[in-house]
């Protein structure tokens, strides 16, 4: 459980830093329109801190030796979550600066969201698999 709590704390700190950055960065540039910077904070709190804590509650059922799907998909989930947050951050900075959004960034955002969604489903399916094995 300790690794889940530690990871959740990391996501909480990143979420708070993203929120502070959003507020101060937009204030500095006197930017009042919508920007994806506003979503980084919420994504890291909900998909990072809360989801990881909820999965941590079931860690005893998710024996990584029995369930390799869980180990792999949880690692992939965390990689894609950080990748998605980075894509949102870069896109938001470009929006505030008034720069054009490169196609590569748009593609990266789509890939990160898709990978995150698939890996989240795999984590949940592995939880279902483990609950069936323990019943």
Image: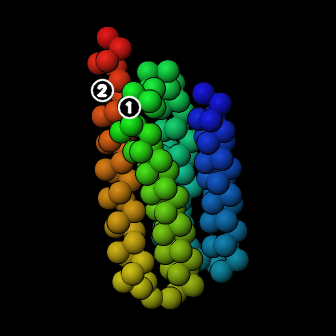
Quarter residue 96 falls in? bottom right
Q: Element type at marker 2? A: helix
Quarter residue 17 falls in? bottom right
Above or below residue 76? Residue 89 is: below
Percent coordinates x, y for residue 110 in the rendering: 34, 67
Residue in view at x 39 percent, y 45 percent: 73
Q: Mark 1 points at which residue?
A: 67
Instruction: Please rate how many residues cluster around mark 1, counting C-alpha atoms within 10 Å: few if below 14, some from 14 to 19, many from 20.
Output: some
Rounded to the nearest whole Å, what is the CA distance between mark 2 and mark 1? 8 Å
Above or below residue 29? Residue 56 is: above
Q: How many labels does the image show?
A: 2
Position of 74 with respect to 122 (left or right) is right
Image marks 2 and 1: residues in contact by CB distance under 8 Å = yes
Percent coordinates x, y for residue 49 in the rendering: 56, 42
Residue in view at x 36 percent, y 39 percent: 69
Q: Name the residue under label 2.
A: 129
Depth check: 110 or 20 in front? 110
Q: In which quarter of the image is the C terminus?
A: top left
Above or below residue 130? Residue 39 is: below
Residue 94: tell me if it is visible.
Answer: yes
Residue in view at x 49 percent, y 75 percent: 91
Position of 104 with respect to 87 (left or right) is left
């Amino acid at each position: 459980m300790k690794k889940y709590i530690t990871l959740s704390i990391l996501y909480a700190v990143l979420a708070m830093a993203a929120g502070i950055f959003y507020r101060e960065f937009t204030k500095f540039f006197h930017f009042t329109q919508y920007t994806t910077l506003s979503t980084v904070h919420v994504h890291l709190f909900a998909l990072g801190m809360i989801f990881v804590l909820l999965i941590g509650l079931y860690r005893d059922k998710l024996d990584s030796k029995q369930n390799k799907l869980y180990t792999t998909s949880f690692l992939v989930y965390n990689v894609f979550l950080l990748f998605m947050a980075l894509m949102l951050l870069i896109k938001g900075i470009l929006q505030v600066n008034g720069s054009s959004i490169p196609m590569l960034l748009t593609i990266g955002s789509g890939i990160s969201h898709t990978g995150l969604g698939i890996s989240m489903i795999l984590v949940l399916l592995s939880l279902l698999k483990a609950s069936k094995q323990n019943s």
